Image (cartoon, helix red, strand yellow):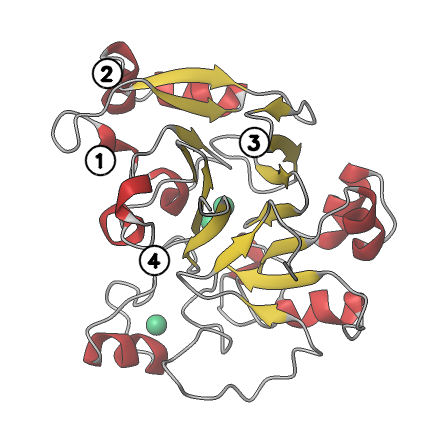
Amino acid sequence: MPPHPEAIILGIAQDGGVPQPGCFCNTCTYYVENESRLSPTSIAVKDGDDLHLFDVTRDLTKQLLFIPEESRQVTDVWLTHGHLGHIDGLGLFGKEAMGASGIRLHASKSMLKLIQNTPRWNSMLEQGVFQPIPFVSNEILRCSSDLSIKPISVPHRDEFTDTHAFLIQGSRRSLLHLPDHDRWDTTLTHVGMKSIRDWFKQIQADVVLLDGTFWSEGEISRQTNVPHPPISETISLLGPRESHDIDIRFIHFNHTNPATPRGDESLDLDLKGWGLASEGEVIELFTDATE
Ligand SMILES: [Zn+2]
Ligand SMILES: [Zn+2]
Ligand SMILES: [Zn+2]
């Protein structure tokens, strides 16, 4: 039997990765001493011969090793937005590195404009490394009989580009990938929903990889300049996880977040039954979880 297509979590850190350059906090020190690191947030979805990559980080070399060798050829790239950790690996596809060609680059109009206005990236369009395919919010792209992808616009600091989450719909299960947004009140107003649960129910998500950048308010002194809903707030809005609830796992951890894993060290945090994603984890999208 051929292996089931699936999503693979390639990175769970915020844009700067863990350890952060020049930081000596306990978490960063742990990673330096153990000669390991967490990569910026990214996922891959295998679908037959196609490999879709959601955001491209500087750790692409390490991240592709989570994917079986025979499926490592990236065919499609999807970009959430223009902040550092989500796009700084794009150059790795160019002629100085992989020398790829014809990769379908799915991005919003404003994201593609940033690429076209950045000479280093625009040259990769001119050389045919990427074939740009602009997407429109809420318009579903059917990639194959097993896979459809719907970009969903979310409010997030838009100094460079707008921001999208992606609803990745397999034939049996759907995954919402939402690494960055500013605040729940603005996001819920933007999508016309009253509660997080209502929204996830409406879009029929079975699994959600959710912005968990910070654990609490005031975790860093400049947090109001880089807003993300803290995990503690998201959990208090959700309430405890019930047995029939969907699977929500937090991603995009800042190095200051106590939810950032440190090896086998157990976390003294009350997640009320909700989860934390880990690198290399596989999520089935095309079969029932129980199969
Ligand atoms: Zn980010
Ligand atoms: Zn640190
Ligand atoms: Zn961002």
Measured from the top left, where is residue 195 in percent x and y? 84, 54
Circle number at residue 273? none
Q: Nearer the viewer, mark 2 or mark 1?
A: 1
In the rendered structure, which disc, 3 or 4, sits on the residue that comes first in sequence? 4
Q: Is residue 198 visible?
A: yes
Measured from the top left, where is residue 49 in percent x and y? 39, 31
Q: Which element is circle 1 on?
A: helix
The mark total stands at 4
In the rendered structure, which disc, 2 or 4, sits on the residue that comes first in sequence? 4
Q: Amino acid at mark 4?
A: Ser
Foreground residue among 201 and 12: 201
Q: Which residue is mark 2?
A: 123
Instruction: Check whether the beta carbons of the residues at disc 1 and disc 4 lie within 8 A of each other.
Output: no
Task: Judge: label 2 CB < 8 Å from ligand 3.
Answer: no
Q: Is residue 217 visible?
A: no
Instruction: Check whether the beta carbons of the residues at disc 2 and disc 4 lie within 8 A of each other.
Output: no
User: Residue 73's quadrant in the figure?
Assistant: top left
Measured from the top left, where is residue 93 in percent x and y? 24, 30
Q: Nearer the viewer, mark 3 or mark 4?
A: 4
Q: Amino acid at mark 3?
A: Asp
**Above or below: residue 152 compared with residue 284:** above
Assign the C terminus to one quadrant of the image. bottom right
Q: Amino acid at mark 2?
A: Ser
Q: Nearer the viewer, mark 3 or mark 1?
A: 1
Rounded to the nearest angstrom, the CA distance separating label 1 from label 4 is: 15 Å
Q: Which residue is mark 4?
A: 39
Q: Amino acid at mark 1?
A: Leu
Question: Residue visible at 61% across and 70% down?
Answer: 275
What residue occupies the far front of the structure in this picture? 1
Circle number at residue 162? 3
Q: Which residue is mark 1?
A: 92
